Structures are given as structure tokens and as C-alpha cells.
Amino acid sequence: MPNRQLVARELAEVFKLLSHPDRVRIIEELASSELDVNGLAELLESPGTRVSQHLAKLKAHRVVEERRDGRHHFYHLKQPDLARWIVDGLTFVEGRLLGVSEGQIATVRELWAGSS
């Protein structure tokens, strides 16, 4: 019984980490390539400082790893399967979102699955 509690607690931590849309997007953007903060900030249309904060949290939870090349810090997923897991999770979103069509979700699935 304690093993199930430990595993459930760890899985809940992963869900908590994924509870921010920017972190979900970062994971999906890192599914296919290694990127630096500026590249991610441009893709997310978000300030670099905000992206850096999310990356720090993802790094602290061992979701991303950092590679340094001079002054640049590049990030990649430690377990790329996490990105595919999120794409699979889109099935649970279908029908729950008001104002978002199945076609829009299908487009997101295609974009993200293509990068996984």
C-alpha cells in the first residue's frame, strides 16, 4: 500500500507541474528540439524572464535538462515521452472546452504530435 501512495503522490506532483499553460507549451516546444530561453520566449510570445522562471521550475522537477554553450543555455526534455503524453491528454479536453471546436483541437494535436 505505501508504494501506491508514493507513486500517487509523485504523479500528483507531475500534474501540479503541468497545471500552467506556459509549462505545457514549453514541454511541447521542447518535444522536437533543444531551445534556449530567447527561442522559447519568441515561440510562446512571452517575456524571457517569465519563460526562465518556468524553465527553472521544470528543471527543479527534473523535467528538462540544461546544456551550456558559452553564454547560451539550451534546454531539452529529459523524458520526451511526456510531450506525447500531453498530446494523448487532448482526448480528455475534447468536449470540455466551450468555444473551441473539435477542428481546433485537431489542429493543436497535429502541431504538437508533429513536434513529438
Image: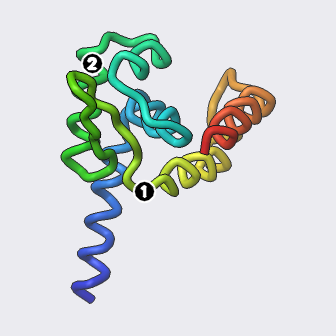
- The correct choice, above or below, for 34 with respect to 22 in the image is below
Q: What residue is shown with label 2?
A: 50
**Disc number placed over residue 79 in the picture, else none:** 1
Q: Quadrant of the C terminus?
A: top right
Amino acid type, label 2: Arg
| Residue at the front extreme of this rendering | 70
Residue at 42 percent across and 29 percent down: it is 35
Residue nearest the viewer, comparing 76 with 82: 76
Q: Quadrant of the N terminus?
A: bottom left
Q: Which mark is in front, 1 or 2? A: 1
Residue nearest the viewer, comparing 5 with 73: 73
How crowded is the residue under tag 2: few (<14 C-alpha within 10 Å), some, or many (20+)? Answer: few
* Residue 73, x across and y down, in percent: 27, 29
Image quadrant where residue 18 sits: top left
Sequence order check, earlier mark of 1 and 2 = 2
Amino acid type, label 1: Gln
* Residue 92, x across and y down, in percent: 62, 49
Q: Is residue 52 visible?
A: yes
- The correct choice, above or below, for 115 with respect to 45 in the image is below
Residue nearest the viewer, comparing 99 with 73: 73
Residue at 24 percent across and 43 percent down: it is 59
